[in-house]
Amino acid sequence: MTFLYRAQSWASSPQTDEETIKYWKHVSMKKNWRIVQLPNGFYQTEYKHPDEDTWVDVTRRETIEGAEAAIDGSVEHYSNKLEFVNGPKVVKTFK
């Protein structure tokens, strides 16, 4: 039996490209999101495409509160990703 072990440090990980960072910045702003009601009564969350004049559907929820919570979660998720674009943040140092 053969095991493959692979370790990566932050320096050896691929760096995030500018297009991805642009996308993260765009979807981390709540003003780029909307909620629409579908004919079946569900609510769909959508974000405005960064480069086109179109809306991209993301999730469907039974309530408008659930849809807004999904948007808030997405905004928080992408905001957190942007915090680490320049590498890990130091949370504690020792002397």
Image: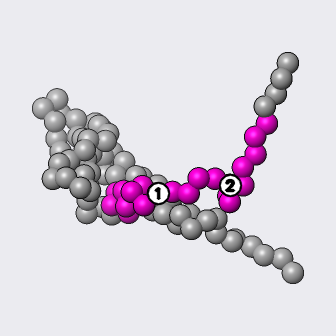
Q: Residue at x 61, y 65 (%)?
A: 87
Task: Report if the CB atoms under discs 1 and 2 are less than 8 Å apart.
Answer: no
The three-letter amino acid code for the residue at tag 1 is Asp
The three-letter amino acid code for the residue at tag 2 is Ser
Nearer the observer, 76 or 42:
76
Q: Secondary structure at mark 1?
A: loop
In screen coordinates, is 11 left or right of 46?
right
Determine if the magenta segment contains residue 39.
Answer: no
Q: Quadrant of residue 61?
A: top left
Q: Residue at x 17, y 29 (%)?
A: 40
Q: Is residue 56 above or below residue 18?
A: above
Q: Is residue 38 above or below residue 81?
A: above
User: In whole angstroms, how far apart are the C-alphas of marks 1 and 2?
Assistant: 15 Å
Give, as a single range, the part of the protein colored magenta. 5-28
In screen coordinates, is 57 left or right of 27?
left
Which residue lies most toward the bottom here? 95
Determine if the magenta segment contains residue 26.
Answer: yes
Q: Secondary structure at mark 2?
A: helix
Question: Looking at the rendered structure, which numbered label has been put on residue 17?
Answer: 1
